[in-house]
Image (spheres, rainbow, N blue to C red):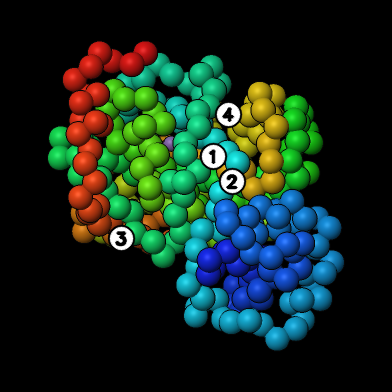
Amino acid sequence: VKIVGFGADSVGVSDGTQVWNVSRLLDSAPSWPPGSALRFAASFDRLKAELMTVMCEMPTATLADTQLAAPVRWPSKLIAFPANYASHNVEMHTGNRADINGFFLKAPSSICGPNDDIVLPDLPEASIHHECELAIVIGAGGRAIPRERVREHILGYACLIDVTVRGKQERVMRKSFDTFCPLGPWITTADEIDDPDRLDLSLSVNGEVRQQANTRDLIVGISEMVEMASSVMTLNSGDVIATGTPGGVGPLVVGDQVEISIERVGQMSLAVRAGGTIDNRAFDATTSKAENK
Ligand code: MN
């Protein structure tokens, strides 16, 4: 089943054609912050049987007519593994490796949906890159999850673009602008993906393929990433793990159309546009400071 987000805080399931609104199965009324998808992720195992019943009812809408939003909003954590494909580490001339250096956090507020635009900040000196990544979405939370039990904790998978300003600033600053984490177009539940460590993924800009790889080339694999993250902190339902980008990263500029596609998961295409008049001088000023180690 595909889990979709739409409206202010609605969650639905889809068979790829129709959409059923399942918000009414959740405990509390819509509220702010938007937490329906998180409650749905937490309740998914319990609701499975009920979903089969709901999907025999009249659908709420067709998938084609539904303006999809990010399938998860407000996860407690957006965890990201840098340097997790050898091909990317070579192009970045970095000695970092995810198995040695681990992961970082990106602001959850950077998440946007498949129908949003990627909004570039006004940083004329900076290069802003696309990173094509498979996202893991956590279902049942947990701490110290051993790799052989990870499958019990994965709700599903989604496409994720880790938009990144290149520079010497802290990663969290360079990667956390609003809209810098397109996520979607839905969560394909884990039961539909036999082997997440054997998925083709690709990203193109204006129809030109820039990145093409397979998750078999991950340095730290899917189970090991969840094991590593949960050894440090409790993973909560709806938490997202960006698994790292293969080689081929490159600049995004205003007017580009960027498309990400992952085998068995889905694909989405987003426009890139210029931001407004937010003053980025504070960001620029850090560029002249010594390199952050
Ligand atoms: Mn990345």
Query: Residue 229: in sight, yes or no?
Result: yes
Between 183 and 213, which is closer to the camera in this rendering? 183
Tell which tag, 1 or 3, sits nearer the viewer: 1
Where does residue 44 sit, x and y in percent of width and height?
76, 57
Upstream in sequence: badge 2 or badge 4? 2
Residue at horizontal 34%, vertical 59%?
117
Q: Earlier in the sequence, mark 2 or mark 3?
A: 2
Q: Earlier in the sequence, mark 3 or mark 4?
A: 4
Residue flagged by tag 4: what amino acid is it? Val
Q: Residue at x 63, y 55 (%)?
A: 35
Q: Is residue 74 above or below residue 145?
A: below
- Amino acid type at circle 1 is Leu
Is disc 2 in contact with disc 1, using a CB cutoff of under 8 Å? yes
Q: Give the residue at mark 2.
A: 75
The disc at residue 220 is: 4
Q: Are marks 2 and 3 in contact (CB under 8 Å)?
A: no
Q: In the image, what residue type sits under mark 2?
A: Pro
Of all residues shown, which one is farthest toward the bottom?
A: 58
Q: Amino acid at mark 3?
A: Ala
Task: Please tell me whether mark 4 sits on a helix, a strand or a loop.
Answer: loop
Q: Are marks 4 and 1 in contact (CB under 8 Å)?
A: no
Nearest-to-viewer mark from 3 and 4: 3
Residue 205's image quarter? Answer: bottom left
The outermost residue toward the left is 124
